[in-house]
Image: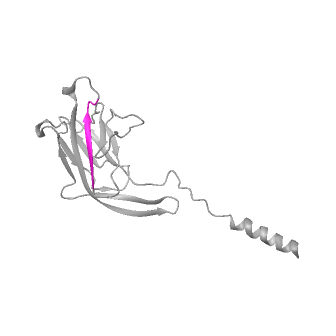
Amino acid sequence: MKKIVVFIMLLACAFSSCEKDDICDANTPTTPRLIIEFYDFDNPSVLKNVSNLRVIGQGMTEPLLFGGAPTTSGSKIALPLRTVGTTTTFSLTLNSGNSNPALIDEDIIRFDYSTQELFVSRACGYKSNFTLDPTTPFTHTDPIAANQRWIRFISVEKNSITNENETHLKIFF
């Protein structure tokens, strides 16, 4: 009788410790970032690389990292929006680190949006999708003088930010 009770106890312990693994698959879509592409202002159909672009979020002291580096020189960037609140502000500095201070130019962009939280799975939790404000999706300023902005025009391509497979904004400079 004792052997049966011990066997049942061991069997119960063995099955009680089995549960589904809660591992979020790396391919599961999570909160998307804002995708921005840079274009030549004088030739709007041509992508243009920024030079040593540094991006710092408001309230942050360190810049965003692009492939582990604090600056990027590509034609496309992805910026994370805050999931708490309805605005995110970034300082975008062109030619950051240049030895000639006259070539360094900073513009500030504040994005206004609404968020929608969606349940992904028990393992992955929630993700947020964003919708840029239809009336005022962004506010573009220059900390020194409005007539010295390096960004000359911003075009909203998609108000809805649900994935990172499409361009949401085009910046012309």
Q: Nearer the viewer, residue 24 or 167?
A: 24
Position in image of residue 170 (x %, y %)? 25, 44
In the image, what residue occupies the spot 22% across and 43% down?
108
* Quadrant location of the C terminus in the rendered image: top left
Extreme residue in the bottom direction: 1
Magenta stretch holds residue 91: yes
The residue segment tinted magenta is 87-96
In the image, what residue occupies the spot 41% across and 58% down?
127
Q: Is residue 41 left or right of residue 74?
A: left
Position in image of residue 103 (x %, y %)? 21, 27
In the image, what residue occupies the spot 22% across and 23% down?
100
In which quarter of the view is residue 18 placed? bottom right
Magenta stretch holds residue 145: no
Q: Is residue 5 left or right of residue 73?
A: right
* Quadrant location of the N terminus in the rendered image: bottom right
Position in image of residue 149 (x %, y %)? 16, 37
Extreme residue in the left direction: 147
Colour pattern of the rendering: one colour
Prevailing SS of the magenta stretch: strand
In the image, what residue occupies the spot 22% across and 54% down?
137
Q: Nearer the viewer, residue 71 or 63?
A: 63
Q: Nearer the viewer, residue 168 or 150?
A: 150
Q: Is residue 4 above or below residue 153?
A: below
Q: Is residue 161 above or below residue 10?
A: above
Position in image of residue 8 (x %, y %)? 80, 72
Extreme residue in the top direction: 99
Q: State the count of labels.
A: 0
